Structures are given as structure tokens and as C-alpha cells.
Amino acid sequence: MKLTWVDISIVLLYLGSMVTIGWVLRKKARQNKLSYLMGGKSLPWYLLGLSDASDMFDISGTMWMVALCFIYGMKSIWIPWLWPVFNQVFLMMYLSKWLRRSNATTGAEWLATRFGTDRKVNASHISVVVFALLGCFGFLAYGFVGLGKFMEIFIPWSSVQAWFPFHVSPEYVPHIYGIVFTLFATFYSVIGGMHSIVIGDLIKYIILTVACVAVGVIAFVRLHGHPLPVPEGWHNPFFGRQLGLDWTKIIADANKKISEDGFSPFGFFFMMMLFKGVFASLAGPAPNYDMQKILSTRSPKEASKMTGFVSIVLLPIRYALIIGLTVLALMNYDQLNLSSPGGTDFEKILPAAIIQFIPAGIMGLLFTGLLGAFMSTFSGTLNAAQAYVVNDIYLKYINPRATNQQIIRRNYAVGVAVVLLSILLGFFVKNVNSVLQWIVGALYGGYIAANMFKWYWWRFNANGFFWGMAAGIAAALVFPYIFVGQLPLYNWPLLFLISVIGSVAGTYTARPTDMETLKKFYTSVRPWGFWKPVQLLVQKENPAFVPNRRFGLDMFNVVIGIIAQCCLTILPMYLVLRMKLPFIITCGILAIIIMILKKTWWATLEN
């Protein structure tokens, strides 16, 4: 076993505290459905923002990003645009407040505010629930595999094998670890609901912050006077048509990894990410833990503040850890054991570097923080899955008059069922990157068109939403079998086109949404876009109504907000790498943008 008793004590203390939090807050969570799923919409924005950031700081994603940083260097800051990470900027500037104005509990329930409650709305409602559950199961399996790979290095199977009365094949060892620690996350999230999730996230974030800063300092000190063995262009975040990194004389398997990823034509890859990312961001948040946190805020203004706070508390801390471990791994690559049955597994760099180069105590904090990161992501995603099953299936179609006790019991049962199914799916996942590519490149590609039209086009109706979602999800499920071995991102334009055709065809084969529903939506949410016919009717009835004319200002804020987000990402990397001039320039750009946004965004926030 690699951990010392100091490290193990920190881990056990953390696990014990999570179980205690869930048990103590169980009564508060059981007060009613709103308290269980959304913390009663009483939690302050900064706690929800910190919790949302903690959910995004997951083991699997961080392992993947350390591997990217190791191989792609400073250019790796662009690859998370696959999500896209800058969707948080769109949310911050306008979409969070639009969403929160609905007062809905889930994304599926939100549809009633946009399309009404007729039969066709029920079909679109079901399509959102199906998509949400597919996404939740995918993220749970993704986190499950990442956790297992992380634990396997820290606690070698040989040291605990005697405790298990059955034989486990090497390829399934990560899954056994995943099951064990999933049980802890399941307990406190299912028993304590949103209140325990947020408090647990706060504790985890404090631990991670201390550990990440310590890792960054260790790397900064050790790098002094020791140039990194990296190819030319590794330190440069900018790029041309081709990636331009050649690892042949340093680590030959890195070239193989670049080839397998399919990122080598980097200019084309970047344009595809940007093209997809803008549309995905315009569509708003996917129905997962991110949306649940937005809907749980106290007001639309606080929803905007919350999503803006996420990038500030997440990116600098996370990238201090990423660049710190990357530097330590590059300086001592020959001491890392990254071998696997399929060759070099660069996703193991994170745990391997922690074991080899992080001292006792700090290792325990980091291990605990990353274990907590898994539990945060897992619990947040599980909470979203429970909300969709209980609120949008059980209460809507099975037992609309359920008592509070029945609702809580169903939440418990659904939580356990979702966990068991996600564990089963985890056994079929090859690696972190494979499921990540399917989620962000394929499944979310089918979600974008219908969810973009719903905000900006008055004529778009429930029938168009259903067929847009159905076409997109069906294509996302089928494409991996048609385009075998191809990066899902490169199939995205076709997937998007299919979803657009489904959306438009479905819209014009059914009547428009009831005008009273549209007028109510338009006056409460106050979106900009193609709403002229509805706007004219609203102003005819209420001449004092002022339409939203913030499109230009919102888009300006989005552009400079994305630049600020990039600065927050690259700032700790420049600092740890001792790149003084780029660091100073980045600080200057960030300071200017903050002063601008204080006037163009913060001072103009509205409910």
C-alpha cells in the first residue's frame, strides 16, 4: 500500500464526516421534495457556485486533463472546449437568469413554461427525461471508471486481495474499487439530499485548495534550474493548422497517443470545437447537476452570480494541480509506471505522480480531495437523476398525489437503482476518454438544436422539440456503429443537421404553441431573439412593457468573458512554469476585463 497512516487517517476522517453529514441532515432533507432536491431554494449563491465547481472538479476529468497537459502542453487548455467549458460564460451573462425565472424544479418541468401542457408537450417532456438519464448514466459510469483507475495505483490489489473471497481479473480491479467508494457517495447523497451535497462539497473544496496550491508550490520549486524535456512548441498555447509536436526522441508513445486521440490536425479540430461549442452554449445547460444548481438559487440575479463564480473558484485551483503534476511527471518520467495491457496509459499520470513525488500528509489531503471530487460529481449527478425520475416520471405519470413520505421513499429507491445501473454500465467502459468523447461529441450533439431553438424562436413548438430531440438522440446512439473508430466530434455537423431537420419539420407539422403560453413565457423570461409577433401582442396589452435589447451587450460580455476564462486557466500554468512575461501580460488582460465586466455585467444584473 502506497499511503502512510497519516494519509489513511485523513481519508478515513473525511469518509466519516461525509457519512455523518448525510445522517445529520437527513431530517432537513425529508421536509419536502423541494428541500430534498433543491435545498429549499434557500442556499446562498456562493455556496451553490462552489458546490457546482466542486462537481466539475472530478477525478476522471482531472486525470484526462493531466494526460492532455503532459502530451499537448499549453495547447491542452483548448481541448476542454469539447464540453464546452465556456458554456459557463454564456450562463453567467444571460442564460442562468432566463432559466431561473421559470421557477421550475427540473429541465423537463421547465418545458411546461415554454410549450404549455398539451399532449405533444408530454412527448417532448419524455424526450428530455430520456436524454437527462442517458447523460447521468454516462457521467456516473465515466466517474466510476476514473475513480477505479485512480484507486488502483494508490492501493495495489495485492495488498487487499486477501480481504476478498473471490478472484478478480486485472482489467476489473478498477471496477471493484469503484463499487466500494461509490457506496459512500451513495449514502450521504441519497440520505441527505441537496443540503448534504453542498456542505460536503464545501469541505472537499477546502481540502482540494490546500492540496492543489501545495502541489503547485512543490513543482515551482523543483523546476528551478531544470528545463523540461518537452518538444518544441510545448510551451506555446497558440497553434497552426497542424499540432506541431513531435515526441519521437523523448517519449515515442506520446506520438501514438496523439494519433489515437485524433487531435493532430489541430486547426480543424479547434474550429470544430468552437463551432459546436457556440451552438451548445446557446442551447443552455444540459439537464444535469449544473442545471439543478441554477434552478436551486434564490433568484435570477443570484443564478447569474453563481455561474460566474464557478470559473473563478474552479479554474486556477484545478490548473495549479494539473500543471504541477505535469511538471513533476515530465521531470521524472522514468520513475512512473504507466504500463497497461493496452500499452502506455497516460491517464495514470495523475495518481502515479502523486505517489512518487508528493510527501506524506499533502498526499493524504490530495488523495482525499480527489476522492471527494469523485463523490461530489457522483452525488450531484445522482441528485439530478433522482429529480428527473421522481419529479418527471413518478409524480407526473404514476402518483401525482403522492405524500411527502412516499416521495422521499421513492427518492431513496431511485437513488439505489441509478447507482446499480451506473455500476453495471461502468463494466462496459473501456477508458475515461472513450465515454467522455461519446457524451460530449455524440449525445450532447443531439441535444443542441432543439434546445437552442426553444430560447430564441417563438414559432418553435413542443412537436418540433420532440422530433429534434428524438432525431438527435437516435443518431447519437447509432453513429458509433456507423462511424467506427472516428472521433465523435467530426461527425457532429451531420448529427446537428439531422437534429435541425427534425426540429424544423416537427415545428411546421403542428400548430404554434398557444399564444397565451408564449406571452406568459416572454414576459417572465424576457429573452431576446426572434420573438417579434409575441412582443407586439404583449406591448399591445401592456404598452409599458420594454423588450430585452441586451443582445449586443450580452454577446460582447460573452466574448470578453471567454477571454477572461482562458486567462484564469493559463495563469497558474505560467506561474508554475516560471514564464514571467506571459504571466504579467495575462494578469494585465484579466484586470482590464474585470474592470469592464464590473460596469457591463455586474452593475446591470437584474432579476
Image: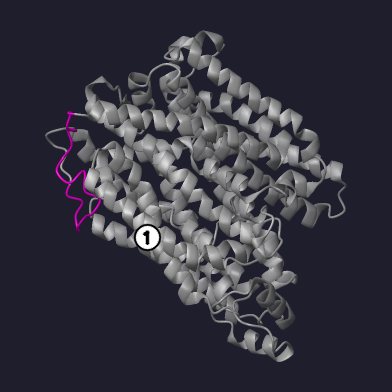
Which quadrant, please, contains the C terminus?
Answer: bottom right
- Identify which residue, 503 or 255, lies in the foreground: 255
Amino acid at pointer 1:
Ile
231 drawn magenta? yes
**What's the residue at 67%, 36% (across, down)?**
189
User: Left of 531 or right of it: where is 596?
Assistant: left
Q: Which of the 4 quarters of the picture holds residue 196?
A: top right
- Identify which residue, 361 or 64, lies in the foreground: 361
- Identify which residue, 604 or 313, lies in the foreground: 604
Asked if residue 485 is positioned above or below residue 110 in the image, the reply reads above
126 drawn magenta? no
Would residue 277 be visible to someone looking at this image?
A: no
Q: Position of residue 372 (x, y in %)?
A: 54, 31
Asked if residue 354 is positioned above or below residue 422 in the image, the reply reads above
**What's the residue at 85%, 45% (across, down)?**
404
Q: Residue furthest bottom?
A: 540
Q: Which residues are magenta?
A: 225-244
> Which residue, given by chain and number where applicable, does mark 1 sit on?
592
Q: Position of residue 161 (x, y in %)?
A: 49, 11
The main secondary structure of the magenta stretch is loop
Q: Position of residue 121 (x, y in %)?
A: 70, 69
Which quadrant, please, contains the N terminus?
Answer: top left
**What's the residue at 79%, 53% (across, down)?**
395
Badge 1 crowding class, 10 Å Cα cut-off, few under 14, some 14 to 19, many 20 or more, is few
Q: Which of the 4 quarters of the picture holds residue 381?
A: top right
Callout 1: helix, strand or loop? helix
